[in-house]
Image (cartoon, rainbow, N blue to C red):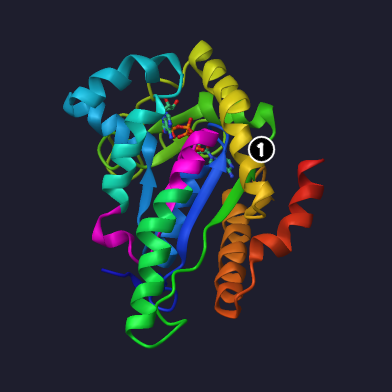
Amino acid sequence: MANESTIDTARNIGPVILLGAPGAGKGTQSKKIVDRYGVPQISTGDLLRDHVARGTELGLEAKAIMARGELVPDRLMYGIVATRLREADCQRGFVLDGFPRTAAQAGWLDAFLKEEVFDKSSEKGSENGSESAEKCPQLVVIQLLVDYNQLLLRLTGRRSCPTCGRVYNIHLQPPLVDELCDLDRSKLVIRDDDRGEVISQRLSAYENQTKPVADYYRRQRRLVAINADRPVEEVTAQIFGVIERHYQDSLLGAGTAQNECQKSESLRSK
Ligand code: AP5
């Protein structure tokens, strides 16, 4: 059920990808998009952690890989992502947090979206005789750029509540009482992979395997890079701006990402 803030924003925003290094704020910002637009957050990290917690076959295979900070093989990712994207709540759009993470995953996602999202939405539009009303806006990819030292602060300081899931940061967004959740007083926990050498491995997996994903979408002119090295609310405002412009442009048949590519280029070179 939509809350107050989603009432005038509940519409088909299409697929939104948040791309960024570990600690860039993908999870934090995904939740803001969920609150505003009433679309689901699809976090492949959360889906995998859920499999690990339930001890499924996939979870057993992924557990040791995630503990080392490496990427889970592509072949394991496609099934869980496809299953989740086929659920009914994804029809008005969704925000992908943590996927795609390799160029191969990005290619797979393009094919999946074409076949199961965009082609189907234009079929529906022509069945209804209305070209634009049912059409799903094209993919937009928002890259969150954050300085390396700030990423380390965010990852080493992250704590989360095991009861309600709220995320804190002991350096940047501390709870009112040390180590306790403000909402339910549960003792905060550290994520297993937020430790020393695992953090380094995750950051290097990002450099080597996920940065090419940004290049992939830049070549398609779908990438909008923003400065995410700012307070949470400022980053959220930039993201909402990109989504709104993308939505308006998609009604007119233009592409926000195309229009914003040049701005991203200058940010990237800073
Ligand atoms: P995943 O769970 O996706 O982790 P990640 O990408 O490493 O990202 P994080 O969750 O660490 O960071 P985030 O960007 O969401 O930041 P957050 O908002 O929490 O993946 C975990 C593992 O699963 C991977 O290592 C891999 O093994 C596997 N996996 C997942 N997807 C996969 C895929 N597609 N293919 C293969 N393997 C896959 O913020 C971090 C901290 O910073 C918090 O404390 C927060 O409070 C703080 N913060 C956030 N924004 C700000 C701000 N603007 N100012 C100050 N503090 C901030």
Magenta segment includes 101: yes
x, y percent for residue 21: 57, 33
**Residue corresponding to mark 1:** 146
222 or 22, nearer to the observer: 222
Q: Residues within 10 Å of mark 1 (few under 14, many from 20)?
A: some
Number of numbered callouts drawn: 1
x, y percent for residue 53: 22, 27
Q: Is residue 98 above or below residue 219?
A: above
Q: Is mark 1 within 8 Å of ligand 1?
A: yes
Q: Give the side of residue 45 with respect to residue 270, left or right.
A: left
Residue farthest to the bottom?
A: 129
Q: Identify the element where label 1 is drawn.
A: loop
Three-letter amino acid code at the position of disc 1: Val
Magenta segment includes 91: yes
At x 64% / y 52%, what residue is drawn?
220
Q: Is residue 153 above or below residue 90?
A: above
At x 41% / y 86%, what residue is drawn?
130
For the C terminus, the image quarter is top right
263 or 214, nearer to the observer: 214
x, y percent for residue 86: 28, 54
Q: Is residue 188 visible?
A: no
For the N terminus, the image quarter is bottom left
Q: Give the side of residue 106 with respect to residue 1, left or right.
A: right
x, y percent for residue 146: 66, 38
Q: Is residue 205 above or below residue 47?
A: above
**Residue 55 location, quadrant:** top left
Residue range in magenta is 86-109
At x 49% / y 56%, what residue is drawn?
16
Q: Is residue 82 above or below residue 204?
A: below
Q: Give the side of residue 103 with respect to residue 11, left or right.
A: right
